[in-house]
Image (tube, rainbow, N blue to C red):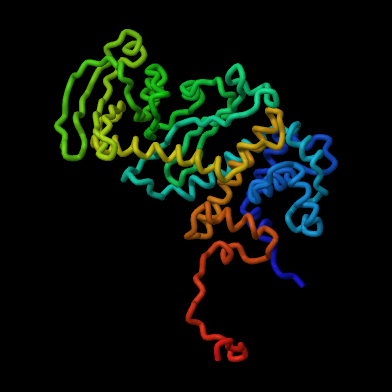
C-alpha cells in the first residue's frame, strides 16, 4: 500500500533537476560513467549534510542499512565509499558550483521583499571572508603558512534572507581585497565591507559602475574636509563631512569626493569612521548599514556549526570544493523550502527536524510546522486511572 514519499524525496522534489542535467552535460561529468551518476553523488552528499555524517564510511554504513529505501530516496545505485570518494575527487566541482548558483538565484527571488533591519529598497550586500583551517600534510595544495594549510570562503551575502549571492573558494594566502576584482558590480546596489577591503582604486571601480559602498576608514587616512552637514548628536552621530583624499596614491586611486561619517556606538562607546560614496542617505542610515554587516559573520558561524564544511570526506582540491558547494546548495535548498511552504520555524529548527526524519513518510509541510498538543484533551475512558 502506498503511504507517501519519504521526507528526503519530498525535500529533493524542490530541486530543479532539468537545470542539474544541463550542468552535468555542460561539464561532461558523466562521460564513460556506467553507474553512480552525478545525481546519485549529489544525493549521497546531501544526505551526509542533512544527517551530519562524519566520514565516507559513515555515509556508506547508514545508506546500506536502508538499502531497501535507496530507490525511494532517488539513489539508483548501490553506495560504496570508494565509488563516492572517486566521484568527489574526479568529477568537476564547477558542476555543483553552477547548480548552487541556480538555487541561489531562485532563493533570492523568493526573499526579495524581506526586510533586513534598514528601510531601503536597494539591494544590500555584505562582503567578507572566513578561514577554514586544514592540516598541511593532508592538504598540501591549500597553502596558508609555513606550518599550516587553510581554505578561504569569500562570500557576498545578500542581507535579504541571508542568501550568499557570490562565493569564491581559495587557499588561505589570497588576500580579501583581491576578491573585489572578481565581482561584477550591480548598479544601485550597496556593498558593505570592513577595513580589510579598503583599496581606493578598487573602490573607485565600484563608484564608476554606479554602485555604492560603505566601509570603515583606517586611522592613518589622510583627507581634506570640503563641507560639513549638521547632525543630531543625540543619535550618536559626531560629524557628516564631504572629503577629498589628500594622500598621493590614494588620491590617484580615488579622485572623486567621499563622504565621511563619524559615529559613536552607544553600546561600546567606540568611535567609528565610515566612508561611502552615497551622499543621499541620512548619516544614521549609513551607520545602520554597517551594523548590518555583522549578518555575514553570523552566516559564517552558522554554516560552520550546522554544515559539514570543517571536516572533509576527501583531501584533493576538487573533493573539498565539491563538498563545500553541495553544502551551500543544501543550505539554500532548505531556505527555499522554508519560504515556499511558509514555515514559521527557523532554518536551524528545520535542519534538526530533517536530520531525524528523512526516512519517514510524513508530509513535509506537516513535519516542519510546529503544532502544540492540547494538554486539556480528556483521557480515554478505557484508560485506567492509577490514583483512583
Q: In the displayed structure, would residue 373 be above or below residue 217?
A: below
x, y percent for residue 269: 25, 34
Furthest toward the front, the residue is 387
The quarter of the rendered structure image containing the C terminus is bottom right
x, y percent for residue 383: 61, 87
The quarter of the rendered structure image containing the N terminus is bottom right
Q: Left or right: 284 with respect to 8?
A: left
Image quadrant of residue 85?
top right
Of 149 and 332, the residue lying toward us: 149
Image quadrant of residue 363?
bottom right
Furthest toward the top, the residue is 248
* Number of marks drawn: 0
Q: Left or right: 208 with respect to 183?
A: left
x, y percent for residue 60: 78, 47
Q: Which residue is located at x 50 percent, y 24 percent? A: 179
x, y percent for residue 330: 60, 46
Image quadrant of residue 226?
top left
Of 277 and 295, the residue lying toward us: 295
Instruction: Judge whether residue 99 can be spotted in this image.
Output: no
Q: Left or right: 313 with respect to 271?
A: right
Q: Which residue is located at x 68 percent, y 63 percent? A: 360
Q: Which residue is located at x 55 percent, y 88 percent? A: 387
Q: Left or right: 64 with respect to 224?
A: right
Of 223 and 57, the residue lying toward us: 57
Instruction: Judge whether residue 203 can be spotted in this image.
Output: yes
Amino acid at each position: 500500500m502506498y503511504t507517501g514519499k519519504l521526507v528526503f524525496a519530498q525535500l529533493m522534489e524542490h530541486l530543479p533537476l532539468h537545470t542539474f542535467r544541463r550542468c552535468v552535460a555542460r561539464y561532461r561529468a558523466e562521460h564513460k560513467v556506467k553507474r553512480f551518476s552525478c545525481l546519485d553523488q549529489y544525493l549521497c552528499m546531501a544526505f551526509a549534510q542533512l544527517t551530519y555524517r562524519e566520514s565516507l564510511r559513515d555515509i556508506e554504513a547508514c545508506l546500506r542499512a536502508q538499502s531497501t529505501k535507496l530507490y525511494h530516496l532517488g539513489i539508483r545505485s548501490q553506495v560504496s565509499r570508494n565509488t563516492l570518494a572517486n566521484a568527489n575527487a574526479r568529477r568537476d566541482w564547477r558542476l555543483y558550483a553552477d547548480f548552487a548558483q541556480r538555487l541561489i538565484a531562485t532563493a533570492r527571488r523568493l526573499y526579495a521583499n524581506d526586510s533586513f533591519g534598514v528601510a531601503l529598497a536597494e539591494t544590500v550586500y555584505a562582503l567578507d571572508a572566513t578561514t577554514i583551517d586544514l592540516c598541511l600534510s593532508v592538504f598540501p595544495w591549500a597553502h596558508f603558512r609555513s606550518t599550516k594549510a587553510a581554505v578561504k570562503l569569500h562570500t557576498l551575502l545578500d542581507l535579504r534572507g541571508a542568501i550568499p549571492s557570490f562565493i569564491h573558494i581559495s587557499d588561505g594566502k589570497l588576500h580579501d581585497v583581491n576578491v573585489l576584482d572578481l565581482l561584477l558590480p550591480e548598479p544601485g546596489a550597496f556593498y558593505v565591507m570592513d577595513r580589510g577591503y579598503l583599496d581606493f582604486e578598487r573602490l573607485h571601480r565600484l563608484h564608476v559602475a554606479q554602485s555604492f559602498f560603505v566601509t570603515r576608514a583606517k586611522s592613518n587616512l589622510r583627507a581634506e574636509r570640503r563641507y560639513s552637514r549638521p547632525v543630531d548628536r543625540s543619535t550618536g552621530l559626531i560629524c557628516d563631512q564631504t572629503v577629498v583624499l589628500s594622500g598621493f596614491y590614494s588620491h590617484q586611486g580615488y579622485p572623486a569626493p567621499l563622504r565621511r561619517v563619524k559615529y559613536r556606538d552607544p553600546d561600546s562607546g567606540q568611535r567609528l569612521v565610515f566612508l561611502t560614496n552615497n551622499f543621499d542617505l541620512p548619516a544614521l542610515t549609513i551607520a545602520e548599514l554597517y551594523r548590518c554587516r555583522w549578518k555575514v559573520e553570523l552566516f559564517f558561524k552558522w554554516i560552520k556549526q550546522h554544515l559539514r564544511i570543517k571536516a572533509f570526506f576527501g583531501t584533493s582540491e576538487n573533493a573539498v570544493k565539491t563538498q563545500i558547494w553541495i553544502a551551500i546548495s543544501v543550505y539554500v535548498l532548505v531556505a527555499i523550502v522554508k519560504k515556499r511552504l511558509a514555515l514559521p520555524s527557523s532554518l536551524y529548527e528545520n535542519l534538526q527536524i530533517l536530520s531525524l526524519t528523512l526516512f519517514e513518510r510524513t508530509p513535509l509541510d506537516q513535519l516542519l510546522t510546529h503544532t502544540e498538543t492540547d494538554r486539556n484533551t480528556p483521557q480515554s475512558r478505557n484508560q485506567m486511572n492509577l490514583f483512583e
